[in-house]
Image (cartoon, rainbow, N blue to C red):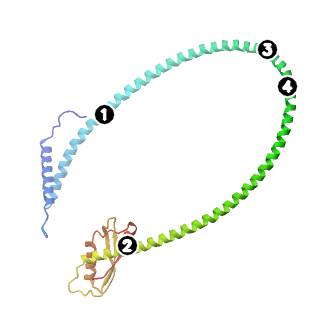
Amino acid sequence: MIKGKLFLSRSVIAAILVHVLVFSLFIVGFQMKPKPNQAMVDPVNIVKAEVIDGAAIEQEKQKIRDEAAARERKKREEQLRKQREAEEKKRQQEEAKKREEEKRQAEIKAAQEQKRQAEEKAKKEAEARKKAELERQKAEEAKKAAEKKAEEERIRAEENAKKLAEELKKQEEAKRRAEEEAEQKRLQAILEQEEAEIQAEQERAAKAARQRELNTLLSQYIGAIQSKVQSRWRKPLGTDTSNAYCKVYVKQAIGGYIEEVAVRQCSGGDEQFRKSVEEAVWKSDPLPAPPDDELFQRELIITFRPS
């Protein structure tokens, strides 16, 4: 933050006062409505004063910004220097820690090697004893295996016979279920087809009813627009509009606000009649809102007939 007082020259102070005065005159002039054919005040000299005053003020502001930028650069350079020193100290500490860790790992590795050799010797002695025991057990297991195999073959034969009977029963049951499922699917298909036909008929009826409703609402919407335009229309003096009509293109925004009006086609009227119709449409802004959002259209063609 920039501390201290800001001293301005007399010319700058005078320029600021002139600038405030001009701005006040501009506000007062804006609030007063000019009369028709009244000459406007030439703003050349006022604009020139504003440009000169703005340049003096901007020059003083730029000087302040330059001083702030220089202090900020110096601050960043000091931060970078301290950061580099901290990083170098951290690197040296990490290297010393790494050397200590390498020494500790070497001592652990030597102790592990001694332990491994002792364990390997004990392991070999245990394996020799285990080998002798295994040979004795193998002889006993071979005898038991022969007896077990004979028993298993007998049980297997009984189970095979039982499985064959169960398989035949399952096949018959599966055949019965398949026939029942096929019949259920056929009946379900018939039911779904009937429901689909009923649903389609209901949707067609609902769509037709909705369309009739929209048609009725559209007639009301167009009638409301035509009625409002008719109420804003003023017959031109000396113009015969008994059999006249115009087709008018209207572009509107959300809310009925008119964006564009163009008389496309007129019959039975003169140029004054065309202008009176276009003016009546513009005076109808905003147009009536549609009774249903689906009826809103940005572009409309209105047929205007004098009542």
The answer to which of 197 and 155 lies nearer the viewer is 155
Between discs 2 and 4, the one toward the N terminus: 4
Between disc 2 and disc 1, whose residue precedes?
Answer: 1
Q: Amino acid at mark 3?
A: Arg
Q: Which residue is mark 2?
A: 217
260 w.r.t. 266: above or below: above
Residue type pointed to by label 1: Glu
Which labelled disc corresponds to residue 129?
3
Residue 265 lies left or right of residue 94; in this view the side is: left
Residue shown at 51%/69% (left/top)? 202
Image position, residue 241 (x, y; %): 26, 86
**Residue density around tag 3, few if under 14, some if 14–19, many if 20 or more, within 10 Å:** few
Dot 2 falls on a residue whose secondary structure is helix
Name the one closer to the observer, 101 or 236. 236
Which callout, 1 or 4, points to the residue nearer the camera? 4
Q: Nearer the viewer, mark 2 or mark 4?
A: 4
> Which amino acid, mark 2?
Leu
Which amino acid type corresponds to the residue marked 4 in the rendered image?
A: Lys
